[in-house]
Amino acid sequence: MSNGVSKKVFCVGSCEKVTGALSPAGYEVACAAEKDIASLVKSEKTPAVVVDLVDTIKGIEILKEIKNANAGVWIVALADNKDIGFIIGALKAGANDYLIKPINEKELQRSVKERKFHSVAEIGIRSQDNISVEEEYRKISPSRFYSSSFVDEYGKIETLRAERYNRVFSIILSQIEWPDDKVNDTADNKVKDKEKKAILKKVIEVITDAARDCDVVGMAVNDQFLTILPETDYMGSLITIRKMRRAIDIITKDYPQISVQFSQSTYPKDGKRYSELLCAAEKRIAEQKDGLWAKFGLKGKLFWEAVSALLEKKHDDPCAASTFDVGNDAEFPHFFLNRLQEITLQDAAHNPKRKGILYLGLRKISPDARILRSIHDMPQTMTKVFIVGEGWGEADIANATPIYISDERLLDTLFILFMTEDTAYAAMCREGWGDTFLCFHAADPYLVESLIEKFQKDYSLQEQL
């Protein structure tokens, strides 16, 4: 021991070989059972833990347990698996470094001593197939499009920078969805190799062009691409995704067989480690595929078409979305709609420094509207509030901006579209017979953001989030 710093390293599996590698550097290696390692790193100081994924029963789960027990400990994973997907899985689970067996003494000593990640280029941990794919992408990509190893290293550095200076940054994950040739084996559905290269080139150009000069764009895994946006919060990343999506829509007109999914995550809200941000972004890709926007095929619809579809559909998961009636002889009285609007305003005012956007469709904007009094009394917030409807003329509404629209559809429909970095809510209520309203509401962030984008586009409003 020197300078009071512990040199006791715990090892799970392959203890003899790890001891042989670290002992010459002055480390004491203590073997630990899988079931005990989490409690050990909680109670005892150690600079690192080495986990042999080959010599353990539940290696990936152990990585998670160690990281949950002591987020600051350096974890080195050992394995003989060179598949990039497996490696990323280990890093996401909690490993800080990944080394290929057989153990190289100098590499392991360097990792434990310097707490430095071994780059992909240094240790060659990609399968030949993935190397070929990346090399192919690099041939057709612009000069600003980087390799997966560079993006991965940069992401880790950006995480450390954000932690040190108390700043935010975001990442955008873009994933190309190709047609399944086994299912869609017609000539119209298949994407030929030559076409695939052309599509990839255009997608890469679109993603790169949408990024700023300070952003880093490059490979993730296979048909996934990553964009790292320094000094960019949640709302800022969504603006970039919009730019990417609009350009991708032009490409998909020529190639309707393919689609591109986008998701994002933001430090530190979605994770304090780069691997956690990647995991959050991948999770959101999956959520979008299972979400209401995709389920009901709303992508090609106009705003009011999407509203009608949501009101008419049956929603089998009341926790995600539901329809209900308001008014005469219904479970909820008519004033419940006013209460929904007020609750949304209260949510916006609860955290005044939280950025957000709120559209309230009132049918008619009149001076005696109850909600206008509530808006007038609310404190100033970072949430931009817009009141939408037919009006009596220009008016100064405190804490909100009126949007006067002459549209008959507004006269029988009320709506709420509210989104912040940690809240999303949409409600729409259409008037029926006997002073009743058919209502729909949901808290699906992707649905809410897409409805806001549709609304702004269809009415030629300034795009903002």
Image (cartoon, rainbow, N blue to C red):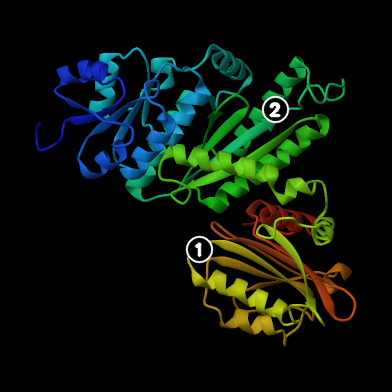
| Earlier residue among tags 2 and 1 | 2
The spot of residue 36 in percent (x, y) is 29, 37
Whether residue 460 is situated above or below residue 75 in the rendered picture: below
Q: Nearer the viewer, residue 188 or 249?
A: 188
The spot of residue 318 in percent (x, y) is 69, 60
Q: Residue at x 70, y 52 (%)?
A: 450
The spot of residue 352 in percent (x, y) is 49, 69
Task: Confirm whether residue 155 shows in the render.
Answer: no
Query: Label 2 is placed on what type of residue?
Result: Lys
Q: How many marks?
A: 2
Residue designated by label 2 = 202
The quarter of the displayed image where residue 194 is located: top right
Whether residue 352 is situated above or below residue 51 in the rendered picture: below
Q: Residue at x 52, y 15 (%)?
A: 127
Residue designated by label 1 = 354
Circle 2 — which element? helix
The quarter of the displayed image where residue 174 is located: top right
Q: Is residue 312 left or right of residue 175?
A: right
Q: Is residue 449 left or right of residue 352?
A: right
Query: Label 1 is placed on what type of residue?
Result: Arg
Quadrant of the drawing holding the N terminus: top left
The spot of residue 229 in percent (x, y) is 51, 41
> Label 2: how many residues lie within 10 Å, few (<14), some (14-19) or many (20+)?
some
Q: Residue at x 75, y 77 (%)?
A: 331
Question: What is the CA distance from the residue labelled 2 to the residue labelled 1?
Answer: 36 Å
Circle 1 — which element? loop
Q: Nearer the viewer, residue 49 or 142?
A: 49
Q: Which is closer to the viewer, label 2 or label 1?
A: 1
Whether residue 156 is situated above or below residue 181 in the rendered picture: below
Q: Is residue 159 left or right of residue 129?
A: left
Quadrant of the drawing holding the C terminus: bottom right
Q: Are marks 2 and 1 in contact (CB under 8 Å)?
A: no
